[in-house]
Image (tube, helix red, strand yellow):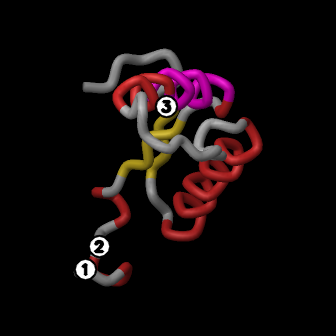
Amino acid sequence: RVGKDQVDPRRVFCLTMQPEYLQRLRMTRLRRELKKQIGQQQGQSIYATLDYVQKDVQKAKDLCLTYGFTEIDVTGRAME
């Protein structure tokens, strides 16, 4: 495991996107996973709620600011 002091912040890029867009992606992913689990116990998930997604995106932005990483907004871009 590499410590934060051993990483050159110029070599780290945080890919972020607008929370509403990320929520749509997560909803799609969650529906796909639930289809695979038909017949199994399905619990509630906060993974795709807008509040949870907004907090995740904010955490990523905070990391960028704290460590001097470059943030790139990839909203609407295909990432493969």
- Amino acid type indicated by mark 1: Val
Of tags 2 and 3, the one toward the viewer is: 3
Distance of mark 2 from mark 1, alpha carbons?
7 Å
For the point 59% across and 46% down, which residue is it?
Answer: 43
| Direction from residue 58 to residue 40 in the image, left or right | left
Please name whichever residue, 37 or 3, is drawn nearer the observer in this view of the structure.
37
**Vertical relation: 24 (above or below) 69:** above
Secondary structure beneath dot 3 equals: helix
Q: In this view, does 64 lie above or below 40?
A: below
Q: Residues within 10 Å of mark 1 (few under 14, many from 20)?
A: few
Query: Where in the figure is residue 14, as x and y percent of width and height?
Result: 43, 48
Tell me which secondary structure the magenta stretch mostly adopts.
helix
Say the numbered circle drawn on residue 2: 1
Tell me the residue at 49%/44% (across/down): 41
Residue bearing mark 3: 30
Residue labelled with disc 2: 7
75 to 62, vertically: above or below: above
6 sits to left or right of 61:
left
Q: Which amino acid does label 2 sit on?
A: Val
Quick one: label 2 or label 1, which is nearer the N terminus? 1
Q: Residue 56 placed where, x, y %? A: 61, 51
Q: Distance between the residues labelled 3 and 1?
A: 32 Å
Tell which circle, 3 or 1, labels the residue nearer the N-terminal end.
1
Q: Are marks 2 and 1 in contact (CB under 8 Å)?
A: yes
What span is in magenta?
20-30
Asked if the magenta segment contains residue 26, the reply would be yes
